[in-house]
Image (cartoon, rainbow, N blue to C red):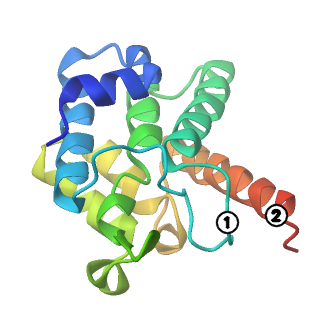
Amino acid sequence: MVEASYIEGKFPELKEIKDSVLRKKVVEVWVDAMNRGGWKELDNIPFTLLIPDVKTSLAEHTSRVTKMALAIGKERNDVNIDYLVAGGLLHDVAKLTEYDFKNGKVVKSEFGKLIRHPVSGLALAMKHELPVEVCHIIGAHSEEGEKVSRIPEAIIIHHCDFVDFEIAKYRAGMK
């Protein structure tokens, strides 16, 4: 069973969330997702299965997206930084339920074949009573968000997520 201290050590960006209740809930969602997925650590979980042999872990991608979003948020000065950071840290958390470890590699889980991480992540966030804005960021950060009007924080996370994905794709030699 994963403890809160593991998540707190893995994501120093948590300190950017000023609201201590929100910060605690973000950690609780990560712990819940790791335990539901049966994961003991984050270092060997790829951030995507769409790029063969991707070198970036889910934790690295999550931190990078959050840091990029935070830089944009601070520059803009008209977004809720707590929601932005919480959304950045949680946007892909449900990949822990979308993925499984079989025969020595990470693959799509049976659950993940039916429900993508933006939807299951939204459900986890709602279960832990995160603000609706943070739930929206999680649910709208990927293609599922194309049908809704994204709030500014979700726009930022969406673009930072895809910047990181597209660069990783390029580095892997994919067009």
- Amino acid marked by disc 2: Ala
Give me the residue at 65% from left, 46% from top: 160
Q: Are marks 2 and 1 in contact (CB under 8 Å)?
A: yes
Residue 141 tag number: none
Going from the N terminus, do you reach mark 2 or mark 1 first?
1
**Helix, strand or loop status at disc 1:** loop
Which quadrant is home to the N terminus?
top left
| Front one among 118 and 4 | 4
| Front one among 125 and 108 | 108
Label 1: how many Cα within 10 Å (few below 14, some 14–19, many 20+):
few
Q: Position of residue 19 (x, y in %)?
A: 27, 17
Label 2: how many Cα within 10 Å (few below 14, some 14–19, many 20+):
some
Residue named by callout 2: 172
Lateral position of residue 127 relative to residue 9, left or right: left
Q: Position of residue 99 (x, y in %)?
A: 38, 69
- Amino acid marked by disc 1: Asp
Residue 53 tag number: 1
119 is higher (above) or lower (below) than 10: below
Where residue 78 sits, quadrant-wise, is top right
Depth check, mark 2 against mark 1: the one in front is 1
Lateral position of residue 42 relative to residue 26, left or right: right
Q: Position of residue 72 (x, y in %)?
A: 67, 29
